[in-house]
Amino acid sequence: MGLAENLQDIQERIRNSAARAGRDPGTITLIAVSKTHPPDAVAEAARLGLTVFGESKVQEAKAKIPLCPGRIRWHMLGHLQSNKCRDAITLFEMVQSVDILELAEELNKKADQASRTLPILLEVNIVGEASKFGYKPEKLLADLNAINNLRRLEIHGLMTIPPWTPVPEKVRPVFAKLRALKEECEQLLGAPLPHLSMGMSGDFEVAIEEGSTMVRIGTALFGERPKAV
């Protein structure tokens, strides 16, 4: 199938998943994960009505974004190094992968220099996978107030990347734990956190059933990533 057919299929699955959970599908944002895909693929997706795109590497985004339609909103999804924070502030509307206090402090500093406020999500490594970045839940709770006190950052919610499995149902407990952690964070902060970014091409339907407000979809939308030459 082509991009238009893929998008139609994904949107239908989002609607069906939302219906099963008794949710309004309009509360779920589809983030088109465009990493390794060229600007013309991004432009085609934008013509089909997609407005939010995600990249995982600052250098790739820095080269690609100027070649893409200007109305697109960009989210940083991948691990962010402190020395890339200045570029991230310029390129992205939101950083979804804040995983340590020191990174938050550097983003706050660069946002202050740029006189802007930066929405962020805190990335959580729910099951403690050694191969993945992200806060351990207990460390996140310990750092939460310090991050919340950084005046140029706005905590909008949590993000996670679950363990890969060919059986989406197996990661339902991971998504449920992130939702529960968000509720715990809301109690600590005394304020609502609007977003849970969870669910990708293989498991987004389960994520929506567990409360996701942002699904990050690349392969199911664009097809397999181009092979490196």
Image (cartoon, helix red, strand yellow):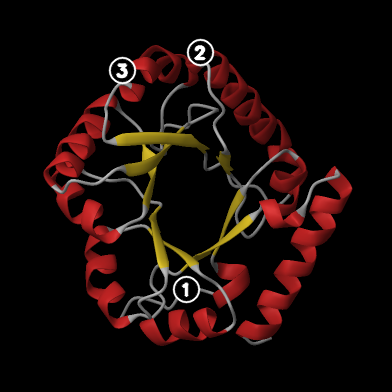
Give the number of callouts. Answer: 3
| Residue that numbered label 3 is attached to | 146
Local crowd at mark 3 within 10 Å, few (<14), some, or many (≥20)? few
Among the two numbered marks 3 and 1 on one chain, the one whose residue lies closer to the N terminus = 3
* Quarter of the image that includes the N terminus: bottom right
Query: Where does residue 5 sit, x and y in percent of width and height?
Result: 70, 83
Of circles 3 and 1, which is in front?
3
Viewed as shown, does residue 100 lie left or right of 24?
left
Q: Looking at the picture, does residue 176 appear above or below residue 201?
A: above
Looking at the image, the residue that sits furthest to the front is: 115
- Secondary structure at badge 3 equals helix
| Residue that numbered label 2 is attached to | 188
Give 52 or 151, whichever is nearer the viewer: 151
Looking at numbered disc 1 in the image, what kind of residue is underneath it? Arg
| Residue that numbered label 1 is attached to | 225
Residue shown at 80% from the left, 51% from the top: 18
Residue shown at 22% from the left, 64% from the top: 59
Of circles 2 and 1, which is in front?
2
Viewed as shown, does residue 196 lie left or right of 145?
right
Q: Is residue 203 visible from the viewing direction of this image?
A: no
Q: State the image quarter where residue 163 is shown.
A: top right
Give 135 or 143, whichever is nearer the viewer: 143
- Do tag 2 and tag 1 residues touch (Cβ < 8 Å)? no
Viewed as shown, does residue 82 lie left or right of 125?
left
Query: Where does residue 213 sit, x and y in percent of width and height?
Result: 63, 47
State the separation of the CA atoms marked 2 and 1: 40 Å
Local crowd at mark 1 within 10 Å, few (<14), some, or many (≥20)? few
Looking at numbered disc 2 in the image, what kind of residue is underneath it? Leu
Looking at numbered disc 3 in the image, what kind of residue is underneath it? Ala
State the separation of the CA atoms marked 3 and 1: 38 Å
- Do tag 2 and tag 3 residues touch (Cβ < 8 Å)? no
